[in-house]
Image: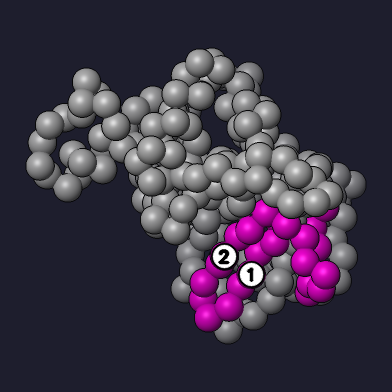
Amino acid sequence: MSSARSYGDPCAAARALDLVGERWALMIVRELLFGPKRYSDLQSGLPNASPTVLSQRLRDLDSGGVIQRRKLGAPVRAWVYELTDWGRQLEPVLVHLGRWGRATSAVQTTMALGADSLMLALRSHLDSARLGDLHATLVVALGEDVFTLHIAQGELAVVRDEPPGWDAALRTDPATFKALLIDGIPVAELSDRLSVEGDRGVLDRLIKALG
């Protein structure tokens, strides 16, 4: 990290902000929370970040040990960015930041919430105590973005993939998922905009656990 952007303060919080306090840094972490992405995927998820700034932040986060670059094997053979084990420890920070941010004034924008933002919103809206003894795997497909939700022992883990087996699958678009997750519109009122396969009770219990 360049000393020009360092607080020069030995406080651990200041040292952390030296790494992730620059504009767009935590947004990149958000985009990588649930799995690796190519540079073009990051551009799509962060359309307001200029290529110059995005590239610089990726270099900063890489040199700081927050992310790493890796080449996928066949048949993809593409370079991707992913969080390191240390970088993944920022997930609860972003979850709590999302909870705190709900008290701020809404931003007037035409930009829709992306799939990764919605998954983070799911984590921040969740009251895990309400999950009870639910043990299930739920697939959430938002257009081309597919996530797997693993629920066990009152905890929710989200990864970007589709497993060979699952208990239930919700397939819809980001706008409908936002209506369900954030706006609190019942599934019955959105039935023509989504499909649920498998055990529908898994989805019902997850929705009831949203605070």
At horizontal 49% and vertical 69% (from top left) the residue drawn is 128
| Most common secondary structure along the magenta stretch | strand
> SS class of the residue under badge 1?
strand
At horizontal 20% and vertical 41% (from top left) the residue drawn is 15
Between the C-alphas of marks 2 and 1, the distance is 5 Å
Q: Quadrant of residue 150?
A: bottom right
Question: Which amino acid, mark 2?
Answer: Ala
Q: Position of residue 148 (x, y in %)?
A: 70, 61
Q: Nearer the viewer, residue 54 or 111?
A: 54
Q: Position of residue 168 (x, y in %)?
A: 79, 69
- Report the label total: 2
Question: Which amino acid, mark 1?
Answer: His
**Residue located beneath label 2 in the image:** 157
Query: Does residue 180 appear to the left or right of 22 in the view shown?
Result: right
Query: Does residue 39 appear to the left or right of 98 in the view shown?
Result: right
Query: Does residue 131 appear to the left or right of 17 in the view shown?
Result: right
Viewport quadrant of the N terminus: top left
Q: Quadrant of residue 14?
A: top left
Q: Position of residue 105 (x, y in %)?
A: 41, 28
Q: Which residues are magenta?
A: 147-171
